[in-house]
Every structure is written in C-alpha cells, then in structure tokens.
C-alpha cells in the first residue's frame, strides 16, 4: 500500500540533509575576514598587529595558561591558579574565558605560536556561526519542499555568511573571541526553541545544547537566550510551547551550574569596576553604523550585508508584520535604558554598551529568510525595501562615522538586491545571467565584510590600547624565568615593565600581576595597602618590585633590567607569626609592610636635609602622580591618576652621596629601607617557619616545628573558598591564616609535631554540582515521560491504520 507523507513531514525529512550551504557559508566567512586582514596588512598577513585591548591583555595569557594546564606545565590546577595574583581562584576565570569547546584547540599548536592558534580559533568560531545559521534557517521557517533542491538552495548559505560577518562579529567580537560563542549560540538556541520545542522533538538534546551554550560563554549565551525566546514567541506563541521552552532552558542552565555558580559568586567578591550610566547613541551615528566600513566604540555595530535589511524591509510592503515588528522592537531596545539593562544582566558594561547587537543581526537575518521562504519578494516589495533602507541611511549624512568606501559599498549592496530575481531564474532567459547573479550576491557581501574588517583593524589601533606581539625576546625571557624557577621553595616574578596585565601566565613565574573581570577585592585592597600599582580601576594589578614585599611573598627571583636577578633571602611560602591580633593596615604603605613583616625596616629621611642615610635604599610613594622623580642621575617614571591608574611604590636607588635629596612630587612620601634590618627580619621568619611545605593544585600542607604557637600565615590572598583543617581560613592582613594549634598532631613525643592543611575550593562549586545533579534527574524523568508519550502515540497511530 502506498503511504502519502504529509507536506510538513516531507519538509522535515528534506531538511535533515543540510547540503553544501553550511560549508559554503563558513568558507565565505573565512575568505572575507582573511581578505580584510590582508588588505589592512594586519597580522598574520602584514606588519600591523592585532594585539589590542583585552585580546592581548587577557585572552592570549589565559589561553597560554590553558595550554600549560593541558600540557601539565602549569603551577596550579582547575581550582587554583598559583601563577597570578599570588594565588587566585581559577575556575571562575575558566568559566568566563576558557570553557568554549574551541578553546582546547590551542593546545595543538606550539606555545610560541599561540597567537596563530587563537587567530585560527577565531576564524573557526565565525565560520561555525555562519554554518549554524545556514543550517537553522530552513528548519526554523521551512520553505516549500520543491525549493530546497532548487532556487532557494543557495539562500541559507548567503544569509548564514551575512550573519557570521555582521559588524558586531568582525568589529567587536574579533578581539573578544569568547563572545563569538554567543554568535554560535543564537542560531543553536533558535533551533532548540523554534524547532525542537515547538515540534516536541529532541527532549534530551535540547537541554544539552542549552548547557553547552551557557558553559561556553554564559554572558553572550544569556543574550542569545533572550533573542531566541523572542523568536520563539513570534514563531510559536502558544503558552504550552513557551512553557516547554522555558523548561528546556532552565534544565540546560541547571546542567551548566558547576561553572555558572562559581562564576556568579566570583563576580560578587571581585573588586568593583566602573559604574556607568547608559547614554544612547545619536540617530546619525546609528544610521552610519548600518553601512560597511564604519567603526565606533560607543555605538552599535549594526552592519549586516545590505541585502539582509533590504529583504527584511520588503516584508513591510507585503503586509507581513511579525518579523519587521520584532526587528524594530529589538533595535529600539538597544537605545532604551531599562531594556539595555535587561540585555546586560542589569549592569551597564565598562566597555562597549552594545554587546547584544549580534542578536539584532540574527533577527534581521531570520526576517530576511522569512522574506524568501514563502516566495521571492516581487519587484514592488524589493523596491520598497530598498527605498526604506536607503532613506534610513540618509540620516548618516550628519555623522562623522560614515566613510566614502562605506557609502559606495552600501550603494552596491542596495543595487545587488535587484539581482535576486535573476539568481532565482524567474526573469533570466539565459543560464549565464543567472550564474552572474549568483556570483554577484556573495561577491558584494564578501567585499562589504572585507572592507569593514580592514577599516576596523585600522581604527582599533588608533583608538584602543595596543600591545606588541610575542617576540623572540619574550621566548628568551620565558626560558630564563623557567631556568630560575624554584617553586614552591620560592616564587619567581616576571617583573616590570609588563607587556600585558597577565604577564605571569604568558612568560611564566608565580607573580603578583593579574588582570581579570574577577580580580578579588581582597587582593586589590591588600596590594594597594602595601604600595602596589594598578590600571583598569583596580582590576589590572601590576607586579610590585620591592624588597619587603618580595620577602613577604617568597619572591626569590625576578626579572629586572633584562635579566633574572636573585632577590636575596626571603621568607618561605608559609610563616608563623607570634600570638596576638592580626595587624590592621593604615594609610602608609611603608608602615603596612612593616606590620605584615613584624619588624621595623624603614626609617624616615633626615629632618635637616630631607635625605636618606647613606647605604639605605630610597623608596617613593606617590600613587596619584604622573611624571618623573629623580635621585641624582637615576630617573624613574610614574603613571598615577586615581581611580583609573595607581602608581606603584618605587625605588629611586641606593643613597650613595651624603645629603643628596630626591626630587619628588610635592605630595609624595619617601622612606629609607635598611637592608640589614630586612635580612634580620627574614631570618626570624625562617627560623620559626614550618619544617616542610607541600603545595598542590588546590592547596598546601605544612609540618610545623614542635611547640609552635601563634598564627600560620600563607602568602596568598584570603579569597573566599579557603579552609584550613576543615574550618574557614582566617585573615591575617588580607592573607590566608589559621591558628598554629588547629593542625593535626603526629607522633607521641612531647611537644607533638603538628600538620596544617589548607585547601581551596571555589565558592559555589558544591552547590553547582548539586544543582547539575538535580537537573540531570529532572531531565531523565522528562525524557522518559516523552518517550512513553511517543510510544503511546505511535501505537495509537498503528491501531488506526487500516
């Protein structure tokens, strides 16, 4: 008996074979980006480097640390990073920067070629986003089955590439590659909600995809989820579908909880960043950003291949309002402060305030596909859409962002829309005309994207902080630090000046420098009290080159003046302090260092001359000052300017000429370090220190001397998550501490030897694992219920079949 397959089911079966469209979309994306980089002579295609802003300052160093972890060369593990900030929580950083499934691919390249590896990963992510959109479009809004093998076969590829090459992708996310996981997440989440949830399919795979997206990058996944929810409301507004979609998302988020909860709690204990008020962009600049070859740090990168908004606008002239209204609503939400805060998890970002723009690009691409899926727009609709987008662009005449190349390519994009009927074959009398039209459309798209890429490369170098790329000198520096490494007997600091804020992860060592969105509040405040410097308003901590802090934090070697130098005797990683209350810091970093050290090592300059005693080392503290200070022929540069920058306490050299006074800023303070006193203080700390110290990837274990009393202090910041012998660790002036009597006794001799164990577990890890377990149980029950329902439905259908 011949069985007729319903039309809807036939569409689904046809859509199961994506064909070459995703591959073509990905290849076109890579080609356009590489062409733009080559035109701009940007690395790896020329002399201009890509190392701007957080790409060099955060992402490359974090990927270097991941490389070390995967190759077994890192100091620390998944929970604790011993290389940065004297020992910081790593799982929140991992969840913020490195949990993308693409991130481990960098381990396939040599460590010296990480920039190449990260560039390749960036291209791969953009190509994957294009391919994902090309796959999803025909499933989300299925066209007639006959068109899938004919006229519309090329359209998903073109629109997918347009999505992957949107302005947000090639201008904003290209130097924030973790955001590109959100670009991939949006079409995947539209597939989950707009197809699987709507059709009651894939009950297991749906939550797993949500979990993958949220684990890869929770920040942009949150925005992508909001966008996919809006798409679901447009495609299937029934309340049961919406509830199934919400359940799918919540189960997926629950599965990702072991990463998400520690990240959330890590942000709560981070040093507060800049609080900004949202200011919407001007209309002229908004219109300009619709065009290719424009750039603006504080305006949304609205560019999507010009054909896309033309097709979306053509729906208005066919009286199809759902998708144009959604596009307009998302666009307006970018400019209204309440919805702006919703998009950004209720906090205005410190950087670009339009990080959700990729969702608008995705919605525009879906609307453009909707204009094609039920039949190509007629000439009247195309003309109307072209006129509407052209009229919007005219407002850019009042903006300084628009460029000559942008206007020319925008006009070419408007004209290319009229090649659509020829590409489909409806108006072409010869195959050559159709082929020409099919070549013209991707060529214009690629040219627009390449020009925008090239323009963005040029503008970023002029507008953003830039950092020199890795050189052979850095390789030699890393090798020298590795040769001097003595961890955990002592730390090796990568020193000053720093190329990036995360120098220890890049070149090695176990220093105090650290830059993250999760820089702990206690670390910033402790280092500031001891005279440390910073940028990025306290989240980018610099290495502090000072003999007292080197002694306190067990820095036995550091990079200085082009070579590794030994710093002299230092205290071990764990020390024992006398019984009594912990010190309380005051206003002077010199006095704070002495309080933490437990001895007087600084002396004031002589009142008569204002000069230090001969043989002492002169130190200057002027955190707000920007300029130079001098002692004799030695000149040092300071870069202050609170709250954004803070100049570190710095050495002016050893006083060698009696009565020579330092030339310092009026509000600076000078103190004179007596190295002999410092050596005596360090010797006292070493005499009372534990006899054995064992360091692991999640803590330390120390054997105390018999009869030890007082407080055991670990030279690591007391961030939330430290416990010692089963109890929350105490704080000793911001460092991890525990009573010496809290350890475990060993042996029968009197007095007994005690062992102290301090371990670190990021706050929220246990709660996250519990949440994931509960979500897994609920998911299992849900999948089982869906399977039973499907079997009952199939049996009922079989019984009804004659």
Image: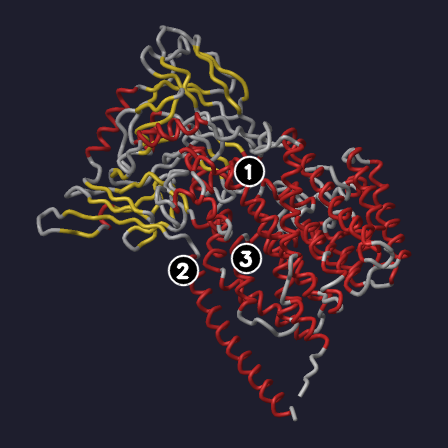
- Per the image, label 2 sits on a secondary structure element best described as helix
Where residue 175 sits in the image (x, y, percent)?
A: 59, 40
* Residue identified by numbered label 1: 54
Q: How far apart are marks 2 and 3 (CA)?
A: 19 Å
Quadrant placement of the N terminus: bottom right
* Residue identified by numbered label 3: 214
What crowding class fits label 2: few (fewer than 14 Cα within 10 Å), some (14-19), or many (20 or more)?
some
Marks 2 and 3: which is nearer the front? 3
Quadrant placement of the C terminus: bottom right
Mark with earlier residue (3, 1): 1
Image side of residue 346 versus residue 400, left or right? left
Residue at 34%, 43% in the rendered image: 736
Image side of residue 227 versus residue 382, left or right? left
The label on residue 766 is 2
- Per the image, label 1 sits on a secondary structure element best described as helix
Query: Who is closer to the viewer here, 46 or 494?
Result: 46
């Amino acid at each position: 008996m011949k069985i007729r397959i319903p039309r809807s089911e036939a569409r689904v079966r046809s859509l199961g074979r994506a064909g070459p469209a995703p591959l073509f979309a990905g290849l076109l994306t890579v080609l356009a980006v590489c062409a733009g980089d080559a035109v701009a002579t940007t690395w790896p295609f020329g002399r201009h480097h890509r190392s701007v802003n957080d790409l060099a300052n955060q992402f490359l160093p974090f990927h270097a640390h991941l490389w070390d972890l995967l190759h077994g060369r890192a100091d620390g593990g998944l929970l604790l990073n011993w290389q940065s900030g004297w020992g910081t929580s790593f799982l929140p950083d991992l969840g913020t920067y490195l949990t993308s499934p693409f991130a481990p691919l960098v381990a396939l390249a040599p460590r010296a070629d990480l920039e190449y590896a990260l560039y390749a990963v960036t291209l791969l992510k953009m190509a994957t986003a294009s391919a994902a959109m090309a796959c999803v479009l025909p499933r989300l809004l299925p066209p007639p089955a006959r068109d899938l093998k004919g006229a519309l076969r090329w359209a998903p590829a073109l629109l997918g590439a347009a999505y992957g090459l949107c302005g947000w992708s090639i201008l904003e996310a290209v130097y924030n590659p973790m955001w590109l996981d959100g670009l991939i997440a949006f079409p995947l989440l539209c597939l989950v909600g707009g197809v699987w949830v709507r059709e009651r399919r894939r009950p297991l795979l749906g939550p797993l995809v949500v979990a993958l997206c949220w684990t890869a990058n929770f920040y942009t996944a949150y925005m992508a989820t909001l966008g996919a929810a809006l798409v679901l409301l447009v495609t299937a507004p029934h309340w049961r579908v919406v509830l199934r979609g919400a359940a799918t998302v919540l189960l997926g988020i629950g599965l990702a909880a072991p990463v998400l909860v520690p990240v959330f709690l890590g942000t709560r204990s981070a040093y507060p960043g800049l609080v900004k008020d949202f200011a919407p962009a001007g209309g002229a600049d908004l219109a300009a950003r619709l065009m290719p070859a424009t750039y603006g740090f504080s305006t949304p990168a609205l560019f999507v291949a010009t054909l896309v908004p033309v097709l979306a606008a053509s729906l208005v002239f066919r009286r199809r309002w759902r998708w144009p209204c959604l596009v307009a609503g998302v666009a307006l939400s970018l400019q209204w402060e309440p919805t702006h805060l919703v998009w950004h998890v209720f906090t205005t970002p410190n950087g670009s305030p339009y990080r959700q723009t990729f969702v608008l690009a995705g919605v525009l691409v879906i609307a453009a596909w909707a204009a094609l899926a039920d039949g190509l727009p007629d000439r009247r609709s195309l003309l109307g859409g072209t006129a509407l987008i052209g009229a919007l662009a005219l407002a850019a005449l009042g903006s300084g962002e628009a460029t000559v190349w942008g206007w020319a390519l925008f006009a070419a994009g408007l004209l290319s829309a009229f090649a659509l009927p020829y590409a489909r074959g409806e108006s072409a009398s010869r195959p050559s005309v159709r082929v020409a039209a099919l070549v013209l459309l991707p060529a214009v798209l690629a040219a627009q994207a390449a020009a925008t890429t090239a323009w963005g490369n040029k503008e970023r170098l002029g507008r953003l902080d830039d950092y020199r790329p890795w050189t052979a000198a850095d390789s030699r520096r890393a090798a020298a630090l590795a040769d001097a490494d003595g961890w955990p007997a002592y730390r090796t600091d990568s020193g000053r000046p720093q190329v990036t804020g995360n120098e220890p992860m890049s070149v090695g060592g176990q220093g105090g420098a650290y830059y993250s969105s999760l820089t702990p509040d206690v670390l910033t405040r402790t280092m500031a009290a001891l005279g440390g410097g910073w940028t990025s308003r306290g989240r980018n901590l610099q290495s502090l080159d000072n003999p007292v802090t080197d002694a306190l934090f067990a820095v036995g070697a550091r990079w200085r003046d082009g070579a590794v130098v030994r710093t002299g005797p230092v205290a071990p990683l764990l020390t024992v302090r006398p019984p009594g209350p912990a010190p309380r810091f005051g206003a002077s970093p010199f006095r704070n260092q002495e309080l933490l050290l437990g001895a007087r090592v600084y002396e004031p300059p002589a009142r008569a001359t204002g000069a230090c005693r001969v043989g002492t080392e002169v130190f200057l503290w002027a955190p707000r000052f920007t300029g130079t200070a001098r002692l004799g022929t030695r000149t040092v540069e300071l870069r202050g300017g609170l709250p954004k920058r803070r100049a570190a306490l710095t050495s002016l050299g050893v006083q060698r000429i009696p009565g020579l006074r330092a030339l310092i800023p009026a509000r600076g303070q000078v103190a004179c370090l007596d190295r002999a006193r410092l050596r005596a203080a360090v010797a006292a700390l070493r005499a009372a220190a534990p006899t054995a110290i064992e360091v692991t990837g999640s803590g330390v274990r120390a054997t105390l001397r018999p009869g030890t009393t007082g407080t055991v202090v670990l030279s690591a910041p007391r961030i939330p998550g430290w416990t010692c012998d089963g109890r929350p660790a105490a704080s000793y002036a911001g460092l991890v501490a525990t009573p010496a009597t809290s350890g475990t006794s060993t042996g029968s001799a009197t007095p007994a030897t005690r062992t102290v164990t301090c371990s670190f577990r990021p706050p929220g890890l246990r709660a996250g694992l519990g949440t994931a377990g509960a979500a897994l149980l609920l998911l299992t029950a849900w999948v089982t219920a869906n399977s039973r329902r499907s079997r009952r439905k199939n049996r009922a259908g079989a019984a009804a079949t004659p």
